[in-house]
Amino acid sequence: MANVKNVAPGIGLCAAIAIPCWFLGEALPVVGGPVFAILIGMVIALWWKQPARGTVQDGIAFTAKKVLQYAVILLGFGLNLAQIAAVGAESLPIILTTIATALIVGYILYRVLSVDSAIATLIAVGSSICGGSAIAATAPVIRAKDEQVAQAISVIFLFNVVAALIFPTLGGMLGMSNEGFGLFAGTAVNDTSSVTAAAAAWDGMHPGSNALDDATIVKLARTLAIIPITLVLGIVMARKEGADGLGNFSLKRAFPMFILFFLVASIITTIAVAAGADAAVFAPLKTLSKFFIVMAMAAIGLNTDLVKLVKSGGKPILMGLICWICIAGASLGMQHLLNLW
């Protein structure tokens, strides 16, 4: 109970910040609640430094780490693996190509630009898979600091907004079909909120289009890549931290257990829906997952030095820009190669 008393004030503070940010994100989905939360947290941190926070800091740290992991677990209840397999088969080559492109380009830029390894990993994974959710899942695995998470989230957010604003017009200029744009938005836009914003804008410009549904399912299929990538990163981290190399390697220590629970949640949803349960039953858990992410981003913002973040932001932004352009190009190129556009 003593531990609960220690963390409760900080958790409550993060929840208090998250509530208005949640509604702001609903009103402006192109930005999203997590971005509002991290920005407000960073602004508060400018005048309320960590030494003055006392025991509240314990709960902030708990939210940034543990609540973030709980959010990822609950995210699994929004994934029906059977539905994704049925609709995602056509998009699988494009998904794999864009993910591989982002990871390869990210690694090259990490070496060429000398970007911090944790930030480079978070930007590459966030660009290739699903933005904030992928960063949320990856950060605990690679032991990323809150400032590194904040920087990666900020970079991803910047190009999410640009993509949501220009991709519908770009797709029209390129003469894309409704299905083609759904694939494009689902594979070339990072975060779910921006995917839906771009696809909804396309549907508004093209009455009768169903790009939003296609883009959402493709996006969910991309989310599954969290599992193998975090597993590989966990193994790499375990090898790095082992004093005797592989002699100290432990699969149990390397495997991110919250990712296992994420997979279990996805399997539960899939089996339940196949047995006749209404998928809407799991909607509250998916909503709670999103709120937990907003809370965690508020905590990360509170633990971030905004001045230092701005001063060190040039190279990560350049890396995010190049990754974003390469992913968009790979998505369009694969669609053209497969005669889907």
Image: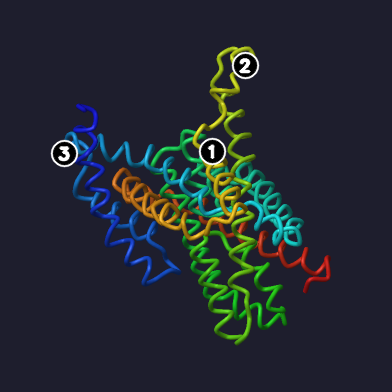
Asked if labels 3 and 1 touch by Cβ distance under 8 angstroms, the answer is: no
Q: CA distance from mark 1 to mark 3?
A: 35 Å
Tell whether 19 sits left or right of 192. Answer: left
Can residue 128 be seen by looking at this rendering? no
User: In this figure, which residue is indicated by the disc labeled 2?
Assistant: 245
Q: Give the percent coordinates (x, y) of residue 304.
A: 33, 45
Q: How many marks are shown on the rendered structure?
A: 3
Q: Quadrant of residue 185?
A: bottom right
Task: Assign a secondary structure to mark 1.
Answer: helix
Please report whichever mark, 1 or 3, sits nearer to the chain's N-terminal start. Answer: 3
Q: CA distance from mark 2 to mark 1?
A: 24 Å
User: In this figure, which residue is indicated by the disc labeled 1?
Assistant: 259
Figure check: 162 above or below 19: below
Figure check: 207 above or below 178: below
Task: Assign a secondary structure to mark 3.
Answer: helix
Q: Quadrant of residue 249?
A: top right
Q: Which of the pair 213/226 is nearer the observer?
A: 213
Q: Which of the pair 302/281 is nearer the observer?
A: 281
User: In this figure, which residue is indicated by the disc labeled 3?
Assistant: 52
The amino acid beneath tag 3 is: Ala
- Which residue lies at the image location 37% right of the left edge and 61% below the top edge? 33
Please report whichever mark, 3 or 2, sits nearer to the chain's N-terminal start. Answer: 3
Please report whichever mark, 2 or 1, sits nearer to the chain's N-terminal start. Answer: 2
Tell me the tag on residue 69. Answer: none
Asked if labels 2 and 3 touch by Cβ distance under 8 angstroms, the answer is: no
The amino acid beneath tag 2 is: Gly
The amino acid beneath tag 1 is: Ile
- Which residue lies at the image location 70% right of the left edge and 59% below the top edge? 88
Task: Assign a secondary structure to mark 2.
Answer: helix
Figure check: 104 above or below 34: above
